[in-house]
Structure formats: C-alpha cells, structure tokens
Amino acid sequence: MTATDPALTALAQGWCALSLLHGKIEAHIERALQAGHDLSAREYSLLDVLSRQHDGDGAICR
C-alpha cells in the first residue's frame, strides 16, 4: 500500500468521519449531563465505575 492507494485514502477518510462523529456525540452527551445533572462526562464515568465496584452492602467487590 502506498500513500496514494485508493484503499488507504478511503480508510483515512472513514477514520476522519468516525472521529468527527465521535466528537459530536461526546459534545452532545457532555452538554446533556451538564444541563441535566451538573456533571461532566468524566465525572459521570467515574461514578459509573465506582457504582459497578460496589456490591450493595457497603463493601467493595474485589
């Protein structure tokens, strides 16, 4: 494959489109979390991880 290979060009364009879409989705989620819950996506992710580690009776699952 060379830098001018059509398959490589198509792959790069697809990757750029996917990256752009991911950014738009991430921004939408960030705005919704901030508006609805005053949380950033990072804070939500941390809470999600912590909630999955908790087994319900005060102990942390290991």
Image (spheres, rainbow, N blue to C red):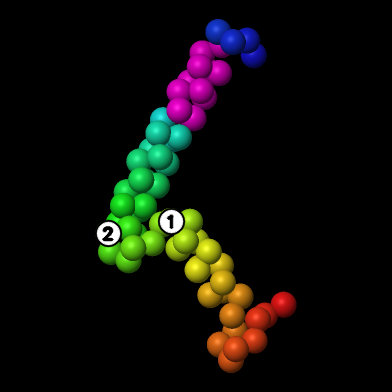
**Residue visible at 56% across and 67% down in the picture:** 49
User: Label 2: few (<14), some or many (≥20) within 10 Å?
Assistant: few
Q: Nearer the viewer, residue 2 or 25?
A: 25
Name the residue beneath numbered marker 2.
Answer: 35
What amino acid type should be assigned to the residue bearing mark 2? Ala
| Span highlighted in magenta in the image | 5-16
- Residue 10: say if magenta: yes
Looking at the image, is mark 2 or mark 1 earlier in the sequence? 2
Q: Look at the numbered disc 1 and give the secondary structure of its residue.
A: helix
Residue at the spot 56% in from the left edge and 72% down from the top edge: 50
> Residue pushed farthest top?
4
In the shown orientation, is residue 37 left or right of residue 3? left
From this view, report whether residue 54 is shown above or below residue 27.
Answer: below
Residue 29 position, x and y percent, is 35, 53
- As helix, strand or loop, the secondary structure at mark 2 comes to helix
Spot occupied by residue 14 in the image (x, y as percentages of width and height): 46, 28
Quarter where residue 61 is shown: bottom right
- Tell me which amino acid carries mark 1: Ala
* Residue closest to the far left: 35
Residue 18 location (% of width, % of height): 44, 35
> Which residue has dot 1 on it?
41
Check the picture and name the quadrant holding the N terminus. top right
Residue 12, magenta (yes or no): yes
